[in-house]
Amino acid sequence: MVNTLVGDVGHFSVIIAFVAALVSSFSFSFAANANALTSEQDAWKKLARGAFFVHVVAVFSIIFSLFNIIYAHRYEYHYAWSHSSNHLPVHYMISCFWEGQEGSFLLWIFWHALLGLVLIKFAGKKWESPVMAVFSFVQLFLTSMILGVVIGDLKIGSSPFILMRDFMTDAPVFQMDPNYVPKDGTGLNPLLQNYWMVIHPPVLFLGFAATLVPFAFAIAGLWKKDFSAWTKPALPWGLFAAVVLGVGIMMGAYWAYETLNFGGYWNWDPVENAVYIPWLVLVGAIHTLLAYRKSKTALRATFILFITSFLLVLYATFLTRSGILGNASVHSFTDLGLSGQLFTYLAAFVVLAIGLLVYRWKSIPATDKEIATYSGEFWVFVGAAVLCLGAFQVLVTTSIPVYNSFMGFIGVKTNVALPADQIAHYTKFQMWMGIAIAMLSGTGQLLWWRKQNGTGKLSEVFTVPLIFTALFTALILMIGQLGLIEKIKTPVYIVLLITSLYAVFSNLAILLGVLRKNISIAGGAVAHIGVALMLLGILFSSGYSNIISKNMSGLVYAKEFGDEINRDNVLLWRNTGTDMGPYKVTYKGQYLEVKDLPDYVNKQQLFRIADEFRAIARGPLKDGDKVLYTAGDTVDIYPENTYYEVEFKNRETGKAFTLYPRAQVNPQMGLLASPDIKMFANKDLYTHVSTIPDPNEEKEWGEMKEYQVKIGDTIFVNDYVAVLHGIEPAKDTLLLNLNEGDIAVQADMQVLGEKRTYHAHPIYAIRNRKEVGQVPEEIEDLGLRLFLLNINPEKGLITIGINSTQKDYIILKAMEKPFINILWIGTLIMSLGFVMAIVRHYKDGKRGNKNGPAGKVIVKREKQLA
């Protein structure tokens, strides 16, 4: 039965949210322009706040309605049908919420709503109205993206509450029965069925949303002609946006590392770049703002960069959602016909923001004072310039599809294509940016510390970091020559190593000095140490990634596989050990995930039935010592992924571990392989299957050969020998549905393989001296299937049937990622540094607001201490 109520509530809430954002935007604007000494401002502000609160309540109503549609499997709605399915766990239903464009827009709107409430509470009387006017205006545009209103040929937004019958109007099933409701949905994208996809998008969109705050303060400063005061509240918000967006980016990198199989964590995909670019500019804006706070220079640059960072977020939205990237990215959303609206959204803010900046340009204070070369501010400004140049380089290449589309729109044909090897293209530029950032972060911080510490001579601050840099560089290069770690020979890699170590030791020296004086100012040093460690982690893990699964057999697996698979992968036959690097590697079988069991279960322990999401246990299934299922119990399984047990045994030490790379064969996307990773202190062993027999396809069995034998006889089949040892009562009759009086027996057979012996027990059932069923035994290692076809007790003859198929195998790729943990540790340390800086500047802002309640408390305490 079609339930239209929840959709009606949701759609009505969208309209309320849109109207409330419109009212709030205009009311805050009037409040910002009203005379502060009259009651007019308070009246407008009261109306604006009320409208924004209504907007927030409406947003929560939209979220509740949409999640209800997904959670309750209301497949009469297109959003639920296209993103969810009956067997998804609840945490993946959360991922369904933002898999589609409408849901991700709603997630973005949600974060803006919460941040708006925080600003209303804490922005202060001076800034609340102009800042919230900008905030509400942005919300107005975002809410329009899910409005779903069609006026003639004009479509405004795409509603997540559209019914299937309204979306697929030409489908015969809905023409015959408009109330038809599908039994199941198409399900969540397999690549998104990962726990990182539950937490990564919310963090990333919080980062997107947070970039609006310093942008709004900058616009408010231009609007109210207060070109300096806005910088104090904007700084902690800029730091907050940078750390959240940075963490969101790195969460996405870790998701890619764990889920995708390109062998790394960053592939320079256009969608990855679209998020990376505004982050670089935002970090540059923070640095110019810090320079301005100390030396009253670079205010204009600060305006430009904070405004640009938010506009680049909007540009990223246009890139990923308009369909303009086409096949250039595996991450972009499909086009919902909103490209024109997205372009309008982007163009409106570009014109308004840049127009206002140009209009106020001459009024923005500028200084002709030249910054001393040996001052920290000079190097901070240079660092910001390097960050922006790096962002510009990525922006130009990423925007090639946009350029081609625009030129095609005006009737000019172009042949500009993205680089064939995008990783090499971006890396050759970005590596030098990394070198420059490492060098500048060390030098700039040391010069700042020289001024902070009152040290006169440069040698006093530079000597110790340079000595440690030289010593550790020489040590690492020497250890590499001895073969204990990766040998660094490439000149640009050596330069990156030196500058990164220099940044680490420079900031470490500052950190040790700060700890003795005032730890509250240590955030910058901690963050820069984290960045330097990230550069070292990237250098080793990407520059010296080592493939250990080289094909040493001299065989070409298949011509259609391509050179990469034939060269860099190893063919593993089931239960046959193969040398790979320092390991003896053995593929041991296929496993499935069973509900309520922490470990994967071997497929041979389960009988598959017609319901693909259920199976029958062939024996006890345990969680440790506790038996959860016994033979004959029906268990719930997750059949999408097949896990392949691969044992790695070190040939020298004898120590072994097991990995379970997984794969699924998706009808729309083909083979989707995800890695399994063994983490060591100094490296990761990263493995994934490259080619497998399709686990969802029926095997092609050869013609059955029948053998009439007696007990003790030998059968020769292919390269193997089978021996019939006897006939005995059947032990496993779950699939036979026997009646009382029926008899089931099994053959006790032994098959001699190349390296081990196998036991097989094909079953034969009799009712009133007639056959009523058979259960063959498959030996997947050998590609054999054995049947007990007939028993002639009078002659003592037993008929055995045997047919064969391709032996079970996988083709596996394995690579070592040296010192990748340094990258993840660096990310955490960088984030800690940002948080420390946020706390410091937030407290500084409160001390500066002597008129606010927090400021009064601080002043009171200062007087008491005095």
Image (tube, helix red, strand yellow):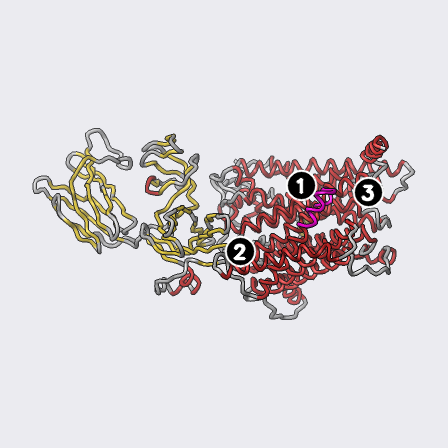
> Residue 488, how many percent across, how many down?
54, 62
Direction right: furthest residue: 37
Q: Nearer the viewer, residue 184 or 595?
A: 595
Instruction: Check disc 2 and report its element: helix, strand or loop.
Output: helix
Q: Residues within 10 Å of mark 3 (few under 14, many from 20)?
A: many
Q: Nearer the viewer, residue 864 or 146?
A: 864
The quarter holding residue 320 reads bottom right
Residues in magenta?
508-522
What residue would you read off at disc 2?
A: 541
Which quadrant of the rendered structure holds the C terminus?
A: top right
Q: Residue at x 90, y 41 (%)?
A: 35
Residue bearing mark 1 = 110
Q: Is residue 693 left or right of residue 843?
A: left
Residue 476's disc number: none
Q: Nearer the viewer, residue 447 or 722?
A: 447
Q: CA distance from mark 3 to mark 2?
A: 46 Å
Quarter-of-image position of residue 431:
bottom right
At horizontal 16% and vertical 44% (from top left) the residue drawn is: 724
- Give amino acid for label 2: Ser
Foreground disc of the pair 1, 2: 2
**Residue 454 seen by the camera:** yes
Q: Nearer the viewer, mark 3 or mark 2?
A: 2
Q: Residue furthest left?
A: 795
Mark 1 or 3 closer to N-term?
A: 1
User: Which residue in the rendered view is the most extreme toward the top?
Assistant: 740
Image position of 622 with respect to 715: above or below: above
Q: Tell me if residue 516 is in the magenta stretch.
A: yes
Residue 70, percent across and down?
A: 55, 39
Marker disc for residue 127: 3
Identify the residue at image location x=35%, y=32%.
633
Measuring from the top left, give residue 596's x and y in whole percent.
Answer: 43, 34
